[in-house]
Image: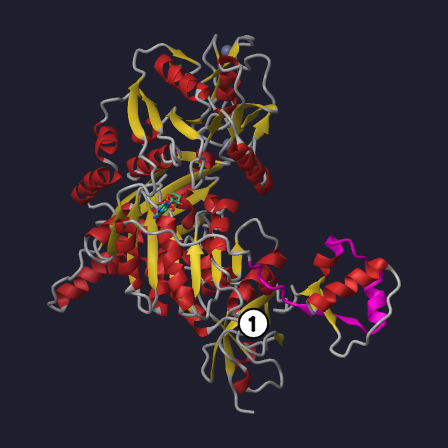
């Protein structure tokens, strides 16, 4: 047999591929890109992916090891997914093996068969005899099989039938046991397309014209403007063309309400992929999509990797949402990936938001994206009235200004609901000694401990460190230690005293721990009556609360003065998102924002002229400072228990980049070429805002470039260099391309 090696990708951090001999006895034509194989790597046994076969290898022949096993006859990863993963690996300077690992459901990564998650079903025998059945249970069971030839085991047991009854029918040759991929659920179609208003119609027409080719589209529409109806009518069009549709939503936005709206409109199988599923369910959803059984896939970030052979349209709702960027491992942006995927598949990509990310808005304003606007609320709903309420030199009770409390009272008396937004959970952000000024701090982070009362303890929100509440100050032994400031728990407690006649419901990560609890609470709020909802971001996103007519924003000030250049952008997005919860149905809503900075120019611009006007003003600033989207950015982060080692590591990186650029300049001067690109500008290294977290010192080096290509040229060489650095075993580092924050 002629000599050849199999080049594979392995899920290890090293940014390279590996050559192995084939499984003994297997010929070259058996191997196809995208198959899984098992290989020994050091002392580990890993599942890798075949990339290609070749006669040439740099590995000495006596060092080559054979593959242990080939797991698939057909490629499991199709060629277009493989190409996309290769692109991701290049763009994020990340190991291809680890990227491919992300593209597969956990069970397949572990080497399971594609059919492993199939479920037990019972099938009617084709030539079933006419039977005389004794028990009524058996008769009714047999009747089911006459209505429908196949039933999932789970479905039958949930209807109260027992294994013994099923076995009895099997003995009589009426039914038999089998295994099958469960069919994705189809709901009863119960909603009809709404007649569109002119803005919606314009958006649908414009995007529809691009079905069948790649076109990025920004659908910028205020909350309640009917973006979802636009999505639904585009989806209807794509389904009619026999296409599959991918809908990506933020982590927190995948509610039964959202899913219900899609399921109620279309008579097709809808698959869901999100973090609440177990491995089996994930594999089932993935395969239903891959085999074309599911026609709509609704999922969170990682659903972007799911194979959809008939993909016809990609929709990304709330495209500005931070959950679309993965914050560890492969730090990819599902939004940016969606655009690359849409380009490869030649389908339109619709990015929807009331508050688009400035990168997206910039692309729309410069004509790279089709820009569609929905400026009015759909139906009869009116936009909420927004008001800044200065609390400078004002007496507050429980953190609320008197006129705000009076307003809340009024809404509650009218039978409506009030939402109080404070983005801080726990009882109080600080526990301090009134005698000497001591503050409870985390031993492992540069951070204060948050005081919680349910259950009572001190908690670090950065490293999860927990301890009991001391009875005396550890410094001066005074018993006089007090909670300072407010979190959701404290507000809840104080509102109970201020509004004894109305229920108060707290919604945060501590009060609502599971998805079930979350859904149950929302049902309760919906069925509702007057109440006050106190909550964090969890309340802000994607929920439709028909009875909320007033929103109080308690602490928006912190975001106005963030050390990060995206601070104002993110604050504005959050404020509008919370505000959007008010008055979504028939009743008009109002939003009161308490602030110490009622004359803050950008905050006023936001309230007087809206997000778009604010966004334009921030874009001007970014342009002046050459910050993204007017430049491209990467962040090299390093952390280590030894501060100097982290600093030294980044200094090495800085030195390397400078030397690289010097050589690049020299080379170009020498050739008499004019340097096309301005190269990469460096900022740092310097400590992160919170330098120490969980016992490690965190430092960063910022890379900026006018041209994306120069940034990536430098980044590619840099990671190769850093991978080979000796003496930094204890330093954890990563390169974050297009980072979402610099904190
Ligand atoms: P968005 O996603 O932009 O926040 P939604 O799609 O949730 O807005 O729409 C808000 C409300 O307006 C929903 O109750 C929806 O049913 C309703 N709606 C949307 N389009 C129309 C329309 N053309 N006519 C009447 N009501 C509409
Ligand atoms: Zn003290
Ligand atoms: Zn901590």
Residue at left offset 60%, top offset 41% = 516
Among the 4 quarters of the image, the one containing residue 409 = top left
**Residue 177 in magenta?**
yes
For the C terminus, which image quadrant? top left
In what element is the residue under mark 1? strand
Q: Name the residue under label 1.
A: 36
> Picture coordinates of residue 590 (x, y %)?
34, 27
Q: In this view, does 315 lie to the left or right of 64?
A: left
Q: Badge 1: few (under 14), some or many (20 or more) residues near its Cα, within 10 Å?
A: many
In the displayed structure, does residue 217 sit left or right of residue 173? left
| Magenta-span inclusion, residue 628 | no
Q: Quadrant of the N terminus?
A: bottom right
Relative depth, front residue between 337 and 624: 337
Asked if 506 appears above or below 44 in the picture, the reply is above
In the image, residue 69 sits, relative to residue 118, either above or below, namely below
Q: Is residue 36 visible?
A: yes
């Amino acid at each position: 047999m002629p000599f050849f090696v199999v080049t594979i990708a392995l899920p290890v951090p090293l940014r390279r591929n590996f050559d192995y001999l084939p499984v003994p006895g297997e010929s070259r034509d058996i191997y196809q890109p995208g198959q899984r194989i098992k290989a020994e790597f050091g002392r580990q046994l890993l599942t890798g992916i075949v990339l290609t076969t070749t006669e040439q290898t740099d590995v000495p022949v006596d060092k080559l090891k054979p593959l242990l096993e080939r797991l698939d006859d057909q490629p499991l990863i199709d060629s277009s997914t493989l190409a996309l993963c290769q692109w991701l690996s290049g763009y994020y300077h990340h190991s291809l093996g680890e990227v491919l690992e992300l593209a597969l459901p956990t069970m397949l990564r572990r080497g399971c068969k594609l059919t492993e998650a199939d479920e037990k079903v019972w099938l009617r025998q084709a030539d079933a005899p006419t039977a005389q059945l004794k028990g009524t249970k058996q008769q009714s069971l047999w009747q089911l099989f006459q209505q429908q030839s196949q039933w999932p085991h789970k479905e039958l047991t949930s209807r109260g039938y027992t294994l013994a009854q099923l076995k009895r029918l099997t003995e009589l040759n009426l039914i038999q046991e089998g295994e099958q991929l469960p069919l994705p659920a189809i709901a009863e179609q119960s909603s009809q397309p709404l007649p569109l208003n002119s803005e919606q119609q314009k958006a649908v027409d414009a995007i529809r014209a691009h079905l069948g080719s790649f076109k990025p589209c920004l659908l910028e529409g205020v909350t309640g403007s009917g973006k979802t109806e636009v999505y639904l009518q585009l989806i209807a069009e794509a389904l009619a063309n026999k296409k599959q549709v991918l809908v990506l939503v933020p982590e927190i936005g995948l509610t039964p309400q959202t899913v219900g709206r899609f399921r109620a409109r279309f008579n097709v199988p809808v698959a869901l992929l999100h973090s609440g599923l177990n491995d089996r369910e994930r594999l089932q959803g993935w395969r239903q999509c891959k085999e074309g059984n599911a026609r709509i896939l609704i999922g969170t970030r990682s659903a972007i990797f799911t194979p959809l052979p008939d993909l016809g349209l990609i929709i990304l709702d709330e495209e500005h949402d931070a959950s679309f960027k993965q914050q560890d491992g492969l730090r990819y942006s599902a939004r940016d990936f969606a655009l690359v995927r849409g380009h490869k598949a030649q389908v339109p990509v619709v990015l929807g938001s009331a508050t688009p990310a400035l990168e997206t808005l910039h692309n729309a304003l410069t004509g790279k994206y089709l820009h569609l606007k929905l400026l009015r609320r759909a139906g009869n709903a009116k936009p909420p009235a927004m008001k800044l309420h200065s609390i400078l030199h004002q007496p507050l009770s429980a953190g609320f200004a008197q006129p705000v409390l009076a307003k809340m009272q009024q809404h509650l008396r009218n039978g409506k609901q009030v939402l109080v937004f404070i983005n801080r959970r726990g009882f109080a952000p600080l526990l301090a000694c009134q005698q000497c000024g001591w503050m409870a701090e985390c031993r492992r982070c540069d951070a204060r401990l948050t005081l919680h009362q349910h259950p009572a303890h001190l908690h670090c929100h950065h490293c999860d460190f927990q301890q009991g509440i001391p009875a005396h100050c550890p410094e001066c032994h005074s018993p006089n230690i007090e909670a300072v400031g407010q979190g959701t728990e404290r507000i809840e407690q104080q509102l109970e005293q201020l509004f004894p006649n109305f229920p108060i419901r707290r919604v945060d990560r501590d009060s609502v721990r599971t998805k079930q609890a979350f859904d149950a609470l929302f049902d309760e709020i919906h069925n509702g009556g007057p109440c006050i909802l106190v909550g964090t971001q969890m309340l802000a996103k994607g929920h439709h609360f028909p009875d909320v007519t007033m929103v109080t924003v308690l602490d928006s000030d912190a975001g106005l003065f963030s050390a990060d250049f995206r601070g104002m952008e993110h604050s504005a997005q959050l404020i509008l998102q919370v505000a959007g919860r008010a008055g979504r149905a028939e009743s008009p809503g109002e939003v009161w924002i308490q602030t110490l900075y009622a004359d803050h120019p950008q905050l006023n611009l936001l309230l007087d002229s809206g997000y778009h006007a604010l966004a334009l003003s921030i874009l001007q600033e970014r342009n002046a400072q050459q910050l993204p989207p007017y430049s491209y950015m990467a962040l090299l982060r390093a952390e280590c228990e030894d501060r100097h080692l982290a600093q030294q590591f980044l200094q090495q990186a800085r030195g390397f980049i400078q030397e690289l650029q010097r050589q690049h300049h020299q080379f170009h001067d020498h050739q008499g070429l004019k340097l096309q690109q301005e190269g990469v500008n460096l900022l740092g290294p310097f400590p992160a805002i919170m330098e120490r977290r969980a016992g490690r010192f965190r430092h960063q080096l910022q890379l900026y470039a006018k041209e994306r290509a120069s940034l990536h040229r430098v980044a590619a060489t840099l990671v190769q260099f850093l991978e080979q650095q000796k003496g930094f075993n204890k330093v954890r580092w990563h390169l974050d391309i297009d980072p979402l924050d610099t904190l």
